[in-house]
Image (cartoon, grey):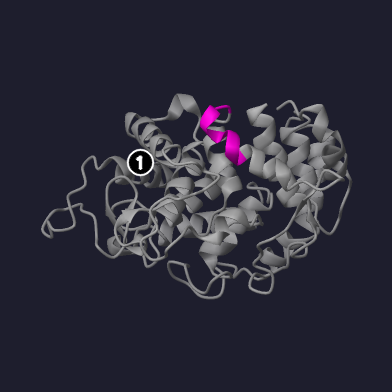
Amino acid sequence: MKVPSEFAESLRWLLQPDAENPGPRLFALREFEGRTADDAEVVAAQRVVMENGPVPAILAAQDPEGWWVKPGAGYSPKYRGTVWSVMFLAQLGADGKDPRVRRGGDYILNRGRAPYGGFSASGTPSAQIQCLLGNLCAALLDLGFFGDPRLDAALDYMARSVTGEGIAPATEKDAPVRYYRSGNSGRRFACAANNHEACAWGAVKVMWALGKVPESARTPAMKTAIQTGADFLLGRDPAVADYPHPWAPKPSTSWFQFGYPVAYVTDLLQNLEALASLGFGGDPRLKNALDLVRSKRDAQGRWLMKYTYNGKMWADIEKKGKPSKWVTLRAVRVLSHAH
């Protein structure tokens, strides 16, 4: 990806070696410098990620069988259970070929899916929820599980949960495959956590995951889900984020507090990342959102960490309120796509 000259200073900062926080350099080399996986600098940067910073701290807490904290579906406890550990490993640049990382991914694929194929907070169909589906599908794709039949089944269910194809309404309790009032409660991102209205957080996660599926491998259901998601997310101004929010009088402030890593909460940057990965990065309806992102850059070409899970994860990631390489990486990514 070509980085506009206005972000040259940002890129120099991202490319600086940083043993305490090595992930942004790895991503910058791959995305902005166009380095391949076998490039000597990429290989070295990947090694540093696996030996320093948060990734080895997460792996050190893993049980030899592949789970974190306790066996099972892995959703609890937040944000140290198996679900979150696998998600964060992917977001922090862990090497998917590492045996420990593979064990974690295999464990989730074997124990974290419901009979329908989608990921579930409890392992049952009633606890399938789209933010979880999208987060885990995205993580496992990033960690190299593309083509695994177990992940294929999860991706298929995720796409059809948006389109409604082959899934009965929640009221049809004798149907072999149906929505549930306690989780994904209907087509087009309807969710119990959003009073059964379309959930934009869930939509962003689904789109983020589908953007990681090679275009040639996208099924008709995936293509329909992508268009449905784009219509929904671009149907409102992302800079305002006034998507359905029945539990509150105004949109969540989390949309406008950029941080990393990203869990079930999402922000404007991830909305833009998801849309850009699917070819919508230059859509004119994103102008206000892109201007908002650009306005948060400081004089040194850096963006601040405003939202963090520090103190809740296995390792802290940068410092809240300080310039963040992770947030800067994400901002430069979306602005470069738009350019």
- Vertically, is 71 above or below 300? below
Res. 18 in view: yes
User: Dividing the picture into quarters, in which one does residue 257 lie?
Assistant: bottom right
Res. 103 in view: no
Secondary element at tag 1? helix
The foreground one among 261 and 35 is 261
Q: Which residue is drawn at 50% across and 55% down?
A: 106
Q: Which residue occupies the extreme front position in the image?
A: 249
Instruction: Tell me the magenta residue range.
Output: 282-289
Q: Residue 197: where, in percent of width, then height?
A: 31, 55
The foreground one among 161 and 51 is 161
The foreground one among 173 and 290 is 290
Drawn side of residue 275 relative to residue 337, left or right: left
- Vertically, is 294 above or below 77? above
**Quadrant for the C terminus in the image:** top right
Q: Does the magenta stretch include residue 39?
A: no
Q: Residue 103: where, in percent of width, then height?
A: 56, 57
Question: What predominant SS class does the magenta segment belong to?
Answer: helix
Q: Residue 209: where, in percent of width, then height?
A: 49, 43
- Vertically, is 112 above or below 154? below
**Quadrant for the N terminus in the image:** top right
Q: Does the magenta stretch include residue 286?
A: yes
Under mark 1, the amino acid is Ala
Q: Which residue is drawn at 20% across and 53% down?
A: 178
| Residue at numbered disc 1 | 159
Q: Which residue is drawn at 59% across and 63% down?
A: 85
